């Protein structure tokens, strides 16, 4: 449960009588049920999120005073103001947030009809999770292993832009180091990873036993990089492994994501940020894929890629990497059902395309990357991708999360 502090903002004209005290006590209990702890001004240096509860009208200046003190410890925190139906709490909340937004602060008023207002309390919880995700992104480290692939001409932003807009630090790691680690993998460590991979496959077509061992070496090397550089995510210039070592990163990136370390392909930092964001906000395992084909009239799209987290699939076969016919690619079957697609982009990574739909079938076409799904879009327009594209790769998560993603983005980025 999300932990946060809440502080009652009071005026000199606190209403008298037990009814007011009983009402405030009921709100206190409701916020505690969400994971809140009542604070005084002595707690303002605590870095947990803070909620301001406007008890009455006439409290605007008091909140500004508390906010100024709070900013000495937490300088860029959005302002969450909770209002209730009585004692001019709502007009005071609107007035003070208007002032803070005039000064460039982010924030919103969260209105509770009563202390038992379940939708209102859920909104508070969701917004607190939004802030937690923002905080985690700001503290995260993404490894860029090699450089972005040469074809990512719209998806190779300056690292400072990623830091400024989304928060993560970018840690660069040379491919020479990766190659060295791959070559130094101890042979005895390979079977413990390879054997479950092989046993779980419904078929193995092109990959040889040596190629299966090689992709396990890549995975084990990437694990060492994650540990050494304390990475929360990474993206790999994977085609250089194909050209230089005649192996692939497809299994390694798949397994790392299932291990809890978001792993993107082709050195695509933009999509890797999107993968991280989607996973942190929704809890769903994300998949990064190419928009391979589309149907504007039917509002359908086919996504395809040679890797997919195996936790997302009903079954999988082991194939070669599509473009090179080398190494190991994963051909997974993802269950039909609701999904959400997203793409972030723009010069400052400040733009978002998001849509919802249903997987209507998986595919095994031989002229596309190995894992393939066809999606019927029910909320959003495929034509947007043609008219105002934000880049190549899309991120897919299972379930419908459009409003959740849009709500976070409008609060934190837009």
Image: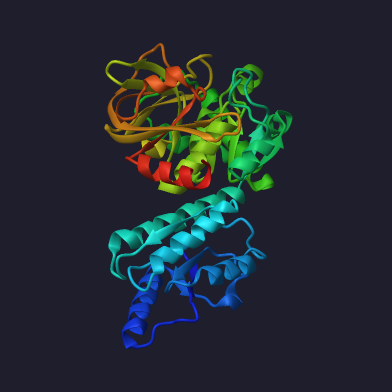
> Which residue is at 59% across, 51% downward?
104
Instruction: In the rendered view, tell whether residue 151 sits above or below residue 255.
Output: above
Please name the residue shown 64% across and 63% down the image.
71
Residue 393 in the image: above or below residue 234? above
**Which sits in the foreground, 63 or 271?**
63
- Can you give x and y, in whole percent of width and height, for residue 97 in the image? 50, 58
Front residue of 60/260: it is 60
Q: Is residue 13 left or right of residue 20?
A: right
117 in relation to 307, above or below: below
Specify how the rendered protein is coloured. Answer: rainbow
- Between residue 409 and residue 283, name the one nearer to us: 409
Farthest bottom residue in view? 17
For residue 411, side relative to residue 349 (left or right): left
x 48%, y 67%: residue: 52
Would residue 318 be visible to someone looking at this image? yes
- Residue 392 drawn above or below residue 78: above
Quarter residue 179 falls in? top right
Tell me residue 216's x, y (percent).
Answer: 55, 33
Residue at 41%, 64% (x, y): give it: 91
Q: Judge whether residue 191 can be spotted in this image.
A: no
Which residue occupies the extreme top position in the image? 367
Which quarter of the figure is the N terminus placed in?
Answer: bottom left
Q: How many marks?
A: 0
User: Could you say which quadrant of the image residue 224 lies in?
Assistant: top right
Return the x and y of residue 361 as percentages of the image width and height: 27, 24
Return the x and y of residue 35 as percentages of the image width and height: 43, 68
Corner quadrant of residue 162: top right
């Amino acid at each position: 449960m999300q932990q946060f502090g809440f502080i009652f903002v009071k005026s000199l004209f606190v209403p008298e009588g037990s009814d007011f005290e009983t009402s405030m006590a009921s709100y206190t209990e409701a916020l505690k049920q969400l994971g809140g702890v009542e604070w005084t001004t002595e707690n303002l240096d605590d870095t947990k999120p803070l909620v301001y509860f406007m008890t009455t009208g006439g409290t605007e200046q008091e909140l500004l005073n508390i906010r100024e003190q709070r900013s000495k410890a937490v300088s860029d925190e959005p302002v969450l103001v909770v209002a209730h139906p009585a004692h001019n709490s709502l007009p005071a909340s609107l007035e003070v947030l208007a002032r803070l937004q005039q000064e460039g602060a982010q924030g919103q008023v969260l209105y509770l009809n009563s202390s038992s207002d379940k939708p209102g309390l859920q909104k508070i919880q969701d917004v607190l999770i939004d802030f937690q995700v923002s905080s985690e992104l700001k503290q995260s480290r993404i490894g860029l292993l090699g450089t972005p692939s040469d074809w990512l001409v719209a998806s190779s932003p300056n690292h400072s832009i990623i830091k400024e807009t989304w928060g993560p630090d970018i840690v660069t790691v040379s491919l020479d180091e990766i190659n060295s680690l791959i070559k130094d993998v101890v042979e005895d460590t390979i079977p413990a990873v390879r054997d479950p991979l092989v046993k779980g496959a419904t078929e193995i077509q092109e990959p040889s036993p040596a190629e299966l061992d090689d992709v396990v070496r890549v995975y084990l090397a990437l694990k060492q990089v994650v540990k050494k550089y304390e990475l929360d995510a990474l993206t790999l210039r994977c085609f250089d492994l194909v050209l230089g070592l005649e192996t692939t990163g497809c299994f390694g990136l798949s397994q790392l994501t299932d291990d809890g370390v978001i792993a993107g392909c082709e050195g695509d930092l933009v999509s890797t940020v999107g993968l991280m964001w989607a996973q942190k906000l929704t809890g769903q395992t994300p998949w990064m894929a190419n928009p391979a084909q589309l149907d504007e009239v039917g509002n359908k799209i086919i996504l395809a890629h040679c890797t997919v987290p195996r936790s997302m699939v009903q079954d999988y076969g082991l194939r070669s990497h599509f473009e090179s016919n080398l190494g190991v690619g994963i051909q997974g079957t993802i269950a039909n059902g609701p999904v959400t697609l997203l793409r972030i982009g723009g010069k400052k990574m400040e733009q978002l395309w998001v849509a919802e739909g249903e997987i209507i079938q998986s595919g095994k076409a031989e002229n596309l990357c190995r894992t393939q799904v066809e999606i019927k879009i029910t909320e959003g327009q495929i034509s947007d991708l043609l008219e105002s594209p934000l880049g190549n790769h899309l991120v897919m998560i299972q379930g419908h999360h459009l409003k959740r993603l849009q709500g976070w983005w409008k609060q934190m980025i837009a």
